[in-house]
Amino acid sequence: MTTPETCFHHHDRETGRHCTRCGRPACASCLREASVGSQCWECVKDAAPPRTEQVRRTLRGATMPVTKAIIAANVAVFLLMAMRNNGNIEGTRAQTSWALYGPAVAHGEWYRLVSSGFIHFGILHIAFNMLILYQVGLVLESASGSSRFATLYATSLLTGSLGALIASPHALSGGASGAVFGVAAAATVAMYRQGVSFWQTGFGPLLAINLVLSFVIPNVSYGAHIGGLIGGALAAEGMIQSRRLQQPWLGYAIAIAISAIAVAASLAIAPST
């Protein structure tokens, strides 16, 4: 029979949780939430930077530079498309040159795997995606850092494109929802690993509801939503585990590998006609 583990500090308390930094078993009272995972109070104390550096990090995280840059890029592209079409924003010819379309990708227009994530078909389309992205960025970018957030977003965008091509290769599709689903899934995974239940993360229920709506509302790319969700969750889990191994570079390598596989698979399955 396996002997239950007890907290390193409170020896009378059984626990199934561990510090992601030192690996020792620790109870809820001794664990402190970190950007990814939880650390015991001793590791937190040992690793705490000077107060001035803590303030600097907090301010840097609060600015959310990547989240704001992505939102600005999406809004800029949206306005550009409207200007090129005399104010028409509900579906334009200019948008078709950037949208995801299987035969176009097969004939060398690989850029559509990325550009499709920055075009939107209407005010409500872009407003809904940017609102959710901002809410996720408040949590995920501020906690995990801008470089990790950017990596997770890029990976989710590419896996979302793959999902869209699998589900509807001959449809013209676009929007940031695949990438947004991915970073929301990443935030859900990170919070779950910190001991927050799926339904209490906030993003978990939102993902579940919107995933169901993807199959109910017409003209919604459920493939992009599923692809982005899977890619973001896998990349986030890779980063979490790599930090537990104290090899943070490995998390980036896993995300890059997922992205490369998504691109290669997209090119392989894109129909020529």
Image (cartoon, helix red, strand yellow):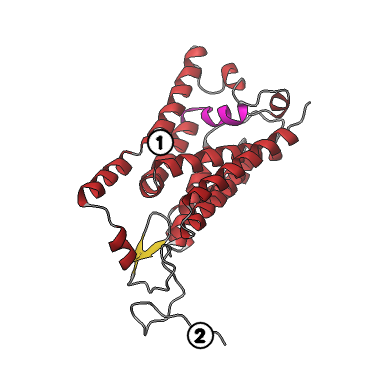
Query: Mark 2–mark 1 contact, CB under 8 Å?
Result: no
Q: Earlier in the sequence, mark 2 or mark 1?
A: 2
Mainly helix, strand or loop, the magenta region?
helix
Task: Please give left or right for residue 237 compared with residue 27 in the image.
Answer: right
Q: Residues within 10 Å of mark 2 (few under 14, many from 20)?
A: few
SS type, badge 2: loop
Residue 140 position within the rendered picture, expressed as x and y whole percent measured from the top left? 41, 48
In-front residue for pair 67/44? 44
- Residue stretch in magenta: 112-123
Of tags 2 and 1, the one toward the viewer is 2
Q: Which residue is mark 1?
A: 66
Three-letter code for the amino acid on which mark 2 is drawn: Thr
Identify the residue shown where x is 76% and y is 31%.
271
Q: Quadrant of the C terminus?
A: top right
Q: Residue furthest right?
A: 273
Q: Quadrant of the N terminus?
A: bottom right
SS type, badge 1: helix
Three-letter code for the amino acid on which mark 1 is drawn: Val
